[in-house]
C-alpha cells in the first residue's frame, strides 16, 4: 500500500447536478465514508466484473459494511462484449429484485465497460437512481467515469444506445492501478495523452518527460489523472450533451471505434485505448494530408506512443481490417455523423485540435486505402 496522502479534488460544475471527482491513493478505503457523505441513507448495488471482483470486491464490501452502508454485488463477465442488451437486462433485473428505490444507488466498480453499463442501468431503473463511479482502470479514471456518458454497444457500432446521466460522486483510487496489467495501463494512458493533444501542449510536453514516473505511481500519476479530469470537466461543464466543443474529446475515436467494431470488440485483438492510439496517429496523418498540420507532428506522436508501448498503425489487424469500405461502414454509423456529413476531430498541431465538419468521405476513403495498401 502506497503512503501518499495527496488527494486532488476536481469539481464538475453542472449547476444542481455538480459533483466531485476525488483522486488519490487508497481512496477505496474511504469509499463508505465518502458515499455516506453524499447519500447518507442509500443502499447500494455494486456492479462489477469477475476480474475486479476477484481482487478488490471484498475490500470494498468490508469498507461499506464498516461505514454502515448496505450493499450487494452484481458480478458480470469481463470484457467489451459485456456492454450488451443481454447484460444490461441482467443488471436492471437484479437491481429491481434487490428492491432498491430511486433514492438508493448503483455503484459502478470497474473499468469503462462496467461504468457505461451500470450508469445506463441507473439512468433507466425507476427512471433514474443515484449513480456513483469507482473506476478501477486508468482509462475509466481519466475518461469514461467523468462527464455522464453511459450506454451499451450495438452490432452496428460502439456506444450507439445510451443516455447522458451524471454520477453523484467519482472516487479514483490511483493505487488500485498497480493491479492492472501493463497492457491495460498503457491502453488507459492513450486517453491521458489525448488531453495534451487536444488543447494542452504543455501537458503533452510534461507527459513525454514523465512516463516512467507515471508508471511508478504516487504524485506524478495523481497529477496526470487529475489534469486529465480537469480538462474533461471543463469541457463537459461548457457542453454537457456534446452539441459542440465536447466532440473534441473524441480525438482518435472515430477511427478507433471503427477498428473496434471491425474486430468485434475482441479484447484479445484490440482494446479501446489501443484503438484510440491508432486513431490519434491516423487523425494527425489525415490532418497532414489535408494540409492542416505538419507531418512532423505525426512523427512526434507516433514515436511517443511507440515509446509507451502502444500500437500506432493497423499492421497488427490485417486479418480483420481488409478494406477502406469496412472502415467507412463503421465511420458512417459514428455518433458524430450529422445528416450524413462526416465530422472528424483533426489538428493544426500538438495541442491544437479542432472539429472538422463536412469532411469529404472520398478523401477519407482514399486516405484509408493508401494506408491499408502500403
Image: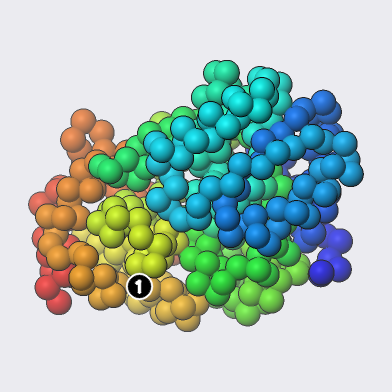
Out of 158 and 328, give the one closest to the viewer.
158
| Residue placed furthest toward the front | 97
Q: Measuring 67% from the left and 36% from the top, which residue is drawn there?
A: 45
Horizontal side of residue 127 vs 371, given as left or right: right
**Residue 222 to residue 240: above or below:** below
Residue 276 in picture, x, y percent from top left: 39, 60
**Residue 256 to residue 33: above or below:** below
Q: Which residue is mark 1?
A: 312
Out of 364 and 64, give the one closest to the viewer.
64
Residue 242 in picture, x, y percent from top left: 43, 35
Query: How many labels, in total?
Result: 1
Say which element carries label 1: loop
Residue 244 in picture, x, y percent from top left: 41, 35
Horizontal side of residue 272 vs 201, given as left or right: left
Residue 215, quarter of the rendered image: bottom right
Image quarter hosting the N terminus? bottom right
Residue 301 in picture, x, y percent from top left: 41, 72
Q: Measuring 75% from the left and 54% from the top, which residue is drawn there?
A: 58
Out of 10 and 101, give the one closest to the viewer.
101
Asked if residue 156 shows in the view, the reply is yes
Amino acid at each position: 500500500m502506497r503512503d501518499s496522502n495527496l488527494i486532488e479534488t476536481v469539481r464538475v460544475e453542472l449547476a444542481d447536478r455538480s459533483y466531485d471527482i476525488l483522486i488519490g491513493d487508497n481512496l477505496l478505503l474511504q469509499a463508505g465514508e465518502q458515499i455516506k457523505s453524499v447519500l447518507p441513507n442509500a443502499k447500494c448495488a455494486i456492479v462489477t466484473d469477475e476480474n475486479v471482483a476477484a481482487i478488490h470486491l471484498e475490500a470494498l464490501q468490508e469498507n461499506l459494511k464498516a461505514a454502515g452502508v448496505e450493499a450487494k454485488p452484481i458480478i458480470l463477465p469481463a470484457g467489451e462484449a459485456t456492454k450488451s442488451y443481454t447484460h444490461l437486462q441482467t443488471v436492471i433485473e437484479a437491481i429491481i429484485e434487490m428492491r432498491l428505490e430511486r433514492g438508493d444507488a448503483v455503484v459502478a466498480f470497474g473499468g469503462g465497460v462496467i461504468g457505461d453499463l451500470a450508469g445506463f442501468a441507473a439512468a433507466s431503473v425507476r427512471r433514474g437512481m443515484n449513480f456513483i463511479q469507482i473506476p478501477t482502470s486508468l482509462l475509466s479514471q481519466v475518461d469514461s467515469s467523468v462527464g455522464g456518458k453511459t450506454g451499451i454497444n450495438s452490432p452496428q457500432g460502439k456506444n450507439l444506445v445510451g443516455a447522458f446521466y451524471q454520477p453523484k460522486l467519482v472516487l479514483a483510487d490511483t493505487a488500485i492501478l498497480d493491479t492492472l496489467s501493463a497492457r491495460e495501463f498503457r491502453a488507459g494512458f492513450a486517453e491521458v495523452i489525448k488531453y495534451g493533444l487536444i488543447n494542452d501542449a504543455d501537458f503533452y510536453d510534461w507527459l513525454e518527460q514523465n512516463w516512467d514516473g507515471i508508471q511508478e505511481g504516487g504524485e506524478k500519476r495523481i497529477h496526470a489523472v487529475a489534469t486529465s479530469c480537469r480538462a474533461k470537466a471543463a469541457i463537459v461543464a461548457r457542453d454537457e450533451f456534446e452539441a459542440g466543443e465536447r466532440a473534441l474529446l473524441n480525438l482518435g475515436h472515430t477511427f478507433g471505434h471503427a477498428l473496434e467494431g471491425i474486430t468485434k470488440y475482441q479484447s484479445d485483438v484490440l482494446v479501446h485505448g489501443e484503438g484510440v492510439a491508432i486513431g490519434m496517429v491516423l487523425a494527425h496523418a489525415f490532418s497532414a494530408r489535408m494540409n492542416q498540420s505538419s507531418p512532423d507532428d505525426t512523427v512526434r506522436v507516433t514515436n511517443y506512443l511507440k515509446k509507451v508501448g502502444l500500437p500506432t498503425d493497423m499492421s497488427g489487424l490485417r486479418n480483420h481490417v481488409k478494406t477502406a469500405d469496412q472502415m467507412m461502414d463503421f465511420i458512417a454509423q459514428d455518433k458524430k455523423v450529422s445528416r450524413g456529413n462526416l465530422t472528424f476531430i483533426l489538428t493544426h498541431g500538438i495541442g491544437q485540435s479542432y472539429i472538422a465538419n463536412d469532411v469529404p468521405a472520398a478523401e477519407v476513403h482514399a486516405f484509408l486505402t493508401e494506408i491499408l495498401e502500403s
